[in-house]
Image (spheres, rainbow, N blue to C red):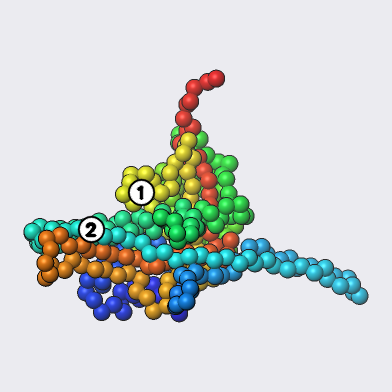
Amino acid sequence: MAITLAMAQVNTQDDVDFTVIDEFRKSSFLLNALTFDDCVSPGTNGATLTYGYTRHITERAAATRQINTEYTPAEAHRQRYTVDLVPMGGKFPVDRVVANLGPAASNEVTYQMRQLIKAAVAKFHDEFINGTAADFSQEDPGFDGLAEVVQGTVTDYTATQSWDSPSLGVDGSAAVHDALDELDEWMDTLDGLPDVIISGDKGIARLRSLARRANYYERIRDEFGREVETYRGVPFANLREKDGSTDPIIPTVDGETDLYAVRFGLDSVHGVSVVGGQLVRTWLPDFTTEGAVKHGEAELGPVAIAAKKTRGVGAFHVRVEQAPDNGGD
């Protein structure tokens, strides 16, 4: 069975969980769009939170043959992968004196919960791109993100056209179309039109600029009334900063940055969760018992990401600003 956050929100019986899931959906295009395969059952007797799957990595060819001759054998190739599910979230302390000061929409418990949700979303975004698998004995376990999955595949592409303003010229019409031609060529290496293009501040800003100049830019409203920008009808999303930091999830280094294209689906890139588990859970501070300071918690998961086709995701490495002048030798 597969589940989305929207489905989990409908099925929840708790008003607080409903509201928290709503915050997760509104805060993250990725989390709202992902389908989670809720099939992992840790069980007992040493069972683990591990999801095993087969990734399609190379295509096979077809051929013609002469009469009375045999075809040369050939085959497509798959590779076995496993990923460990991890919970992500946190807890916060609240003193009972300040817990309910002010209106319910802005009191300390509500404020801390919203900030925790924001951090959990940023953590998921960071793992989605930059995550690396780690053993559960390590302090910060995780799963392989798209940067690891796509590295060295046919959809891992380094642009020859620069997207920095001087390279595009004053008018830039021809240069803009050349840049978008190369972007389209990269998108065509995927096995279908992607569901989202992901980048950071610089990448999204330059993509928006190029799309506008070539009249491929459009803005639509999603189910929450948020503005969603698109190129060729494909939404693009800025993942912004890492949790608890101002460091971008997808940085610009020496004038270069990355864009990722993703096709969602149980046959491509999707989430993984446990059987019968809640995707999102909350624990509010209980001030009915003794003790001045109580704790609240929110948790997403345990979850992980599976990429079942190398052509379901791609990376586009491009220059978006002039290289810094480090001086001559």
Q: Give residue 104's mark.
A: none
| Mark 2: amino acid | Phe
Label 2: how many Cα within 10 Å (few below 14, some 14–19, many 20+): some
Residue under the point 34% across and 51% down: 243
On-image quarter of the N terminus: bottom left
Q: Which residue is mark 2?
A: 92
Q: Quadrant of residue 252?
A: top left
- Secondary structure under tag 1 reads loop
Q: Nearer the viewer, residue 136 or 245?
A: 136
Q: Is residue 136 rendered to the left or right of residue 227?
A: right
- Front residue of 165/115: it is 115
187 up-or-down from 72: above or below: above
Residue drawn at the location 28% of the way across and 64% of the way down:
298
Can residue 19 be seen from the camera position used here? no
Percent x, y of residue 134: 48, 57
* Location of the C terminus (image quadrant): top right
Which numbered dot is residue 241? 1
Asked if residue 88 lies left or right of residue 46, the reply is left
Asked if residue 115 can be seen in this view, the reply is yes
Q: CA distance from mark 1 to mark 2?
A: 21 Å
Q: Residue, x 55% and y 57% (percent of image)?
A: 149
- Please provide percent x and percent y for residue 67: 90, 74
Residue 85: horizontal and vertical position, in percent? 44, 66
SS state under label 2: strand
Answer with the quarter of the image where residue 63 lies. Answer: bottom right
Counting residues from the N terminus, which is met first, the one under dot 1 or under dot 2?
2
> In the shown orientation, is residue 319 left or right of residue 17?
right
Q: Amino acid at mark 1?
A: Glu
Question: What residue is shown at x 45% (from left), y 75% (from top)?
Answer: 42
- Furthest residue toward right: 68
The one of 87 and 264 positioned closer to us in this rendering: 87
Instruction: Name the spot of residue 16 as percent of width and height, x first.
Output: 22, 71
